[in-house]
Image (cartoon, helix red, strand yellow):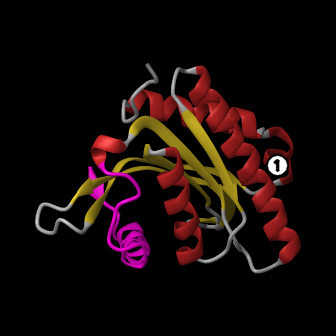
Amino acid sequence: MRLFRWAALAVISVLLAAGGRAPAQAADTVPCAIVFGGGGSVTGNKEADDLWFAMNSATSKAVAAELTARGYRVELFVSNISGMKPRFDALYFKMRDTRCDHVVEISSANGETPGPPPAKTFGFSVQVLHFDPSPTNPRAIVVVGDFTGDYQYPLTAESMESLYPSDVGRQIAADIDDAKTLKKAS
């Protein structure tokens, strides 16, 4: 397990705004996961961002459906909110309302492979997170990462035509299931 510093900073700001309380104390949570997809601007170009949002949404829905089929309780939360703090504010309230004990965050990830020649890629970065009480501060929490996965594909016409969000979602869910980081619904 590892601490995700960026997520911890975002969650700390949300918790301070909420009076320093975690979304749900450990005793109040239930074994479920919020599949948190979507996410604001990727490229700064509205048409391209709309495409990435649609792909992320479809993939997030496929992950949620496959995790549900594998016996997990899942709450799907796809949001096009931009900015780290507004996104985590929304996630905070979703966690509070559902009392879920884990988050499966699905982010769009675009990049390049090393050359020569470099090739453009697209894909998804996946993190499974949970929150533990801070051992040193009763008003604080620690964000713990249980699983990370990067799913990158060449950004070519062929891969855009042949790659289906349902296939990517099944692979992501299978990897999360194999990692045994989530508890199945009882």
Label 1, secondary structure: give it.
Answer: helix
47, 12: nearer the viewer = 12
Magenta stretch: includes residue 5: yes
Residue shown at 36% from the left, 36% from the top: 181
Start and end of the magenta stretch? 1-25
Residue shown at 12% from the left, 60% from the top: 135
Q: Position of residue 137 (x, y in %)?
A: 15, 69
Compared with residue 21, is residue 12 higher up or lower down, i.e. above or below? below
Give the total of numbered labels: 1
94 relative to 108 in the view: left or right? left
Q: Position of residue 159 (x, y in %)?
A: 79, 46
Q: Mark 1 belongs to which amino acid?
A: Met
56 relative to 51 in the view: left or right? left
127, 92: nearer the viewer = 92
Q: Where is residue 9 in the image (x, y as percent from the top left)?
A: 37, 75
109 relative to 11 in the view: left or right? right
45 relative to 38 in the view: left or right? right
Residue matched to label 1: 160
Magenta stretch: includes residue 22: yes
Quadrant for the C terminus, please: top left
